[in-house]
Image (cartoon, helix red, strand yellow):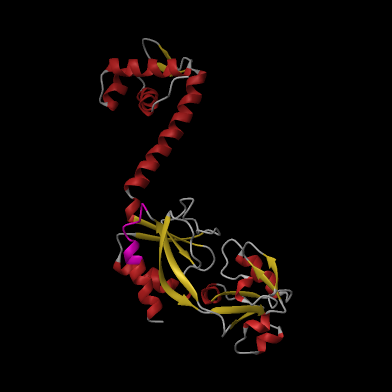
Amino acid sequence: MADVELRQLRCLVAIVDEGSFTDAAIALGVSQAAVSRTLASLERALGARLLRRTSREVTPTGTGLRVVSHARRVLGEVDDLVREAASGHTHLRIGYAWSAVGRHTLAFQRRWGETRPETDLQLVRVNSATAGLADGACDLAVVRRPLNDTRFDSAIVGLERRLCVMASDDPLARRRSVRLADISGRTLLIDRRTGTTTTELWPPGARPATEDTRDVDDWLNVISTGRCVGMTAESTANQYPRPGVVYRPVRDAEPIAVRIAWWRDDPHPATQAVIELLTSLYRTS
């Protein structure tokens, strides 16, 4: 079957909307003969008659009505695509898996609005290893572990402490901080796709048992029962305070690097501005 072209669909819709070949030609800025040829080529490509012509009017056939409906949808989507591509640099989507940039999130949003009002900022939560970067859900991503993928570049903008998360009636909750050894005999609830915690933090022979989760709300709900504990970046405590759970610093655990990641071959023009602002916020905390 021959390919259907956008110009053919635009021609068909113009004829139906304008009511005649003459008016469609005027609307499209082409000759009436060109309109007739374009419609004929579309009908040949589809193998169906789309319009009935009389001396007084042009009306769609049954097939024509269905094709016009599809054509409007296709043309609308194409127009949206063109607008999105043309205005892409006036919008900035930053993806994150669990907790954006923690207590800096509000300051970041407000400072961005004050200093870069021409670029609309949107934070997008996507619980994937690249926080939505790989599938096009965002332009930049906040990640807390290295992306071992040559398609992406990243820069560290700050460091965050590791916190242990436990039920508020857990014996460890009475302490102001904990050590890794305090957790080794417990069951640790982890997110293997996006989480920052693995049993590699503990020496062999002293590693905690683990259970898996795939969402921060489920993670908190299970921890609140006392069955498991968790470990996370301090940003999670700022973004997800929850009755029934408490967060305590793990004083002998290495901090977590917070990174901004982007497509190596297609960085958003605002990438450097984001890195500089977030670095400043983390540095002054």
Look at the magenta stretch and give its main secondary structure. Answer: loop
Image quadrant in which you'd find residue 215:
bottom right
**In the image, farthest residue toward the front:** 204
| Quarter placement of the C terminus | bottom left
Image quadrant in which you'd find residue 227:
bottom right
Q: Nearer the viewer, residue 242 or 197?
A: 197
**In the image, farthest residue toward the top:** 55
Q: Is residue 148 left or right of residue 116?
A: right
Residue drawn at x 29%, y 22% is 25
Q: Is residue 207 above or below residue 97?
A: below
- On the image, the x and y values in percent for residue 46 come to 47, 19
Residue drawn at x 48%, y 25% is 67
Q: Is residue 264 left or right of residue 209?
A: left
Q: Nearer the viewer, residue 91 or 52?
A: 91
- On the image, the x and y values in percent for residue 266 come to 36, 52
Q: Which residues are magenta?
A: 265-274
Image quadrant in which you'd find residue 194:
bottom right
Q: Is residue 227 left or right of residue 81?
A: right
Q: Is residue 37 left or right of residue 148?
A: left
- On the image, the x and y values in percent for residue 140 come to 41, 59
Q: Is residue 214 above or below residue 35?
A: below
Residue drawn at x 44%, y 20% is 2
Q: Is residue 70 above or below residue 42?
A: below
